[in-house]
Amino acid sequence: MTVVEGSRIVTAPGWTGKARTDLALIDCDVHQGYKKVDDLFPYLPRVYRERVIDQGLLIPSSGYFNNPKRAARTDLVGCDANMADRDGRNRGTDYEGLKGAHLDVWNVDRVLLTGSGANGASVIPDPDYGAAFCRAFNDYTMEHWAAKDERFMVAISVNVRDPQRAVEEIHRLGDHPQVKAIMLPTGAIMPYGNRFYHPIWEACEQHGLVVGIHPGAEGSGMAGPPTGVGYPTYYIETRMARPQMAMAHAVSFIAEGVFEKFPKLKVLFDECDQFWAVGLMWHMDADWKSLREQTPWVKRLPSEYFVDHIKVGSQPMLEPENEEQFFMMLDAMHADRTLVYCSDWPHWDWDDPATTFPKLPERLHKRVFADNARELFAL
Amino acid sequence: MAERVVVAPVEEIPPGRRKIVVPFRGRAGIGVFNINGTFHALRNLCPHKSGPLCTGAVLGRLVADAPPSGRPLVVDDYRVDQDGEIIRCPWHLWEFEVATGRCLVDPTVRVKTYPVNVEDGQVVVYADPADLPEQPVALGGSPPDQPGS
């Protein structure tokens, strides 16, 4: 790889990336952040400011694992590929960098800002600090990101562990025209279909907000371990655990009748892989035919609820052995209705919009890169 | 020559009971059911995985209008539709409407049904509806006070 000082685009052997101008492009996973903790102080109550100064954030990050290069691409403006910037600053967290190296390069029409760092607020024992942290991060995001670019849609962070506080935050910001979703970690104290969370889903439905779920906080704080068999040792194992968590939440939403109760509710799973959806739909449908009696409020095939209510982010896009398998799996997961493009800016494992997929038929391309998201966010 | 089988005297299959007849159009045979006084015959072969469908439990269809989290807790919350009219295959519990053979969990699936006639006090199953006698003596129907019902 060649990294040119001050350059905005990486060039590498085999790189064929070109800006797309022919089709709309909606990116459903872009991480905005703050540069340093002090950036949040104007939005935190004094009691928490002083606590943070004294003791640090006390918010567990995205699990316990060793995400390389502090998760970020090292080619980005302001980043040092040799990890020289060890001053505690986060990378890829400024608007100008995102605009110059992503939005303008790829002609991105809309971006869902999915946050960073606030996931852990949902798994700490102090519900009020968790809620205050989410609120501060949201206010920072609205002022320093959303206000700067009309292309931004915001997935606000809420403390899902305390439905009362989460609902308050949804009512506070839910009608802002750029607020389109809430963002929750895959790590949780119990699966998201549980009735404990229903007041939050009710509020989301009321404001037309999508329920976004993204890896984070698994194995941290009060959340359960990242897998059903406990704590894996290495980072790569925790990545493979993401589909497990997405499946657990998706099944829970369907089996608990959440989509019968809140028929307009939509759920988005970002960064949890994709093709788990195929096996899950097939297995759930087969089992529902035998076990329907145990959840008689699930009135349709589980796959019908899935396709109607759940979207799956395309990053990290799985890489089948050949294109035939790729298209077979896309077909099996009903990608024309379930798959939305995600870049995961600015992380090292990001997917660009040009080289991630084999050449898709035009209709499918439009569904994945724009129309599914357009429908999801009612754009 | 009409393909028909005399299954049993009417009183041998009172309401709520069944009789399996093997073989009939294949080794799987048929199940003859008395549902509320009307006789029905089904192929004893589940269209799902070829299980012995007619040996399954005959029950109702449990339904719920809404998830339990949206309602007060009551013990008789679930409604049972078509009680005693639904058979569940013993192999994978798929539900079928005995009277029609309609599968309740997969509308693309149906189990074959056969016409049943009562002739001279005998339950008779025909392979082909066209072979039914022109004026059935007493199609279906069974005295309501049969012993064992």
Image (tube, grey):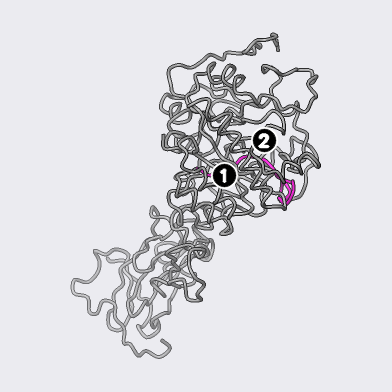
Whole-angstrom CA distance, mark 2 to mark 1, is 42 Å
Instruction: Choose between A40 and A375: the one closer to the eye.
Output: A40
Most common secondary structure along the magenta stretch: loop
- The disc placed on residue A40 is 2
Image quarter in which the C terminus of chain A is found: top left
Q: Amino acid at mark 2?
A: Leu
Q: Residues within 10 Å of mark 2 (few under 14, many from 20)?
A: some
Are the residues tagged 2 and 1 within 8 Å (C-beta)? no
Q: Residues within 10 Å of mark 1 (few under 14, many from 20)?
A: few
Q: Are marks 2 and 1 on the same chain?
A: yes
Q: Amino acid at mark 1?
A: Gly
Residue interval drawn in magenta = A210-227
Q: Is residue B124 left or right of residue A35?
A: left
Place of residue A179 in the rendered image (x, y in percent of width and height, measured from the top left):
50, 38
| Residue at 48% from the left image edge and 35% from the top image edge | A178
Give the letter of the chain under mark 2: A
Q: Secondary structure at mark 1?
A: helix
Within the magenta stretch, is there residue B15?
A: no
Give the letter of the chain under mark 1: A
| Residue at 53% from the left image edge and 17% from the top image edge | A104
Instruction: Choose between A315 and B86: the one closer to the eye.
Output: A315
Place of residue A200 in the rendered image (x, y in percent of width and height, measured from the top left):
54, 52
- The disc placed on residue A368 is none
